[in-house]
Image (cartoon, helix red, strand yellow):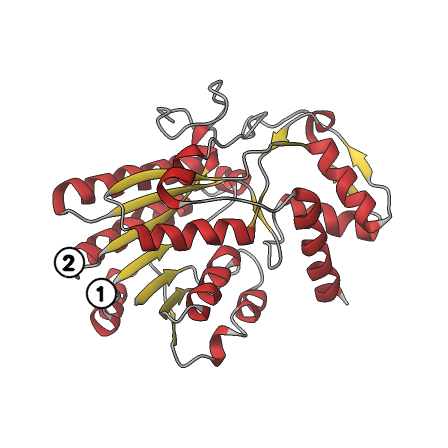
Amino acid sequence: MRIMVTGGAGFIGSHTVDALLARGDEVVCIDDFNDYYSPRRKRENLTVAQTSASFHLYESDIRDFQEMDRIFSIEKPQKVIHLAAMAGVRNSVKFPLLYEEVNVRGTLNLLELASRHGVRNFALASTSSVYGASKEIPFKEDSAATKPLAPYPATKRSCELLAHVYHHLYGLRCTALRFFTVYGPRGRPDMTPYLFTQAISLGREITLYDDGRPQRDFTFIEDIIGGVLATLDADLEYEIINLGNSQPVVMRDFVTIIEDLLSRQAEIVSPPLPATEPPLTYADISKARRLLGYNPTTSVEEGMRRFIDWYQQEAA
């Protein structure tokens, strides 16, 4: 199977690429290697993939419709997993126009081309942030999700709706995957697990909002990849599916896990929770279990041990 992975040099993207190659798929990887974080790190993420004859890399921007059309014409992907995006909730408040341009227009380009070029299955990354501060706990996919707290989740909800349009009008099979706080080796340096691990390792302060009372549904990367591959294989018509761990962790407890693994105490400052942040994320994953056989098994303690092992090797 020939599968296109956009954002394939990123955290989730590079793990997806490696997993697809390992099972024998051909992979068409698209990434623009922008400087939201280190392009060098992204290139290192593809070290293993670059050794495979089944791996094809295009350093291209999904906003460039003509270039994307050229790649679709050359490579003729049978399926697409669309992970490329501007990520980060708080950063989207600073750069809302950029987030709309990349996330919404870039996704629309890919949906249009997937439809024109006969792609069988289009899976796209969404986010738990679309639920905002929902009082419906745990978060279920049939929630209206009409009150996002920042531009980033608003763009992702827009992408889900556009995917439905392309399914409705053209029969394009689309699945939107709502990821819940993904972490693990190769994790982005702007995300909490990396920021906290780095700061505690170096004896620097960490910012723990609202005295650490918020809760987050941390989901290990290998569990997420299992859900992504199952989605590509399932060829569902149109679905929105949560991929989480369904075991929210109190943030102060999360810090304690890192402290124990590093054998160091955190220096903590605790401002109020920003308006962009919900007090809780909590995935109902019954739909993912039913449709995909999704079954996350990695505890936060084990996942963070594996992340910190990777982090320490990188920092050495």
Q: Hey, which quadrant is residue 258 in on the image?
A: top right
Count residues near mark 2 (Cα–Cα under 10 Å), then give few for <14, some for 14-19, many for 20+. few
Q: Is residue 34 visible?
A: no
Left or right of 313, for residue 73: left
**Quick one: 63 or 265, which is closer to the camera?**
265
Q: Residue at x 35, y 24 (%)?
A: 144
Count residues near mark 1 (Cα–Cα under 10 Å), then give few for <14, some for 14-19, many for 20+. some
Which residue is situated farthest in the left direction here?
Answer: 169
Q: Residue at x 17, y 62 (%)?
A: 117
Q: Position of residue 272 (x, y in %)?
A: 68, 24
Q: Is residue 188 visible?
A: yes
Q: Position of residue 41 (x, y in %)?
A: 59, 66
Q: What amino acid type is highlighted by mark number 1?
A: Asp
**Quick one: 116 or 283, which is closer to the camera?**
283
Q: Residue at x 19, y 49 (%)?
A: 172
Q: Hey, which quadrant is residue 293 in on the image?
A: top left
Left or right of 282, for residue 266: right
Which residue in the structure is indicated by mark 1? 69
Disc 1 and disc 2 in contact, CB within 8 angstroms: yes
Q: CA distance from mark 1 to mark 2?
A: 9 Å
Q: Which label sits on residue 116?
A: 2
Q: Residue at x 80, y 49 (%)?
A: 261
Q: Hey, which quadrant is residue 214 in on the image?
A: top right
Query: Tag 2 or tag 1, which sits nearer the N-term?
Result: 1
Left or right of 179, for residue 167: left
Left or right of 285, for residue 65: left
Q: What amino acid type is highlighted by mark number 2?
A: Arg
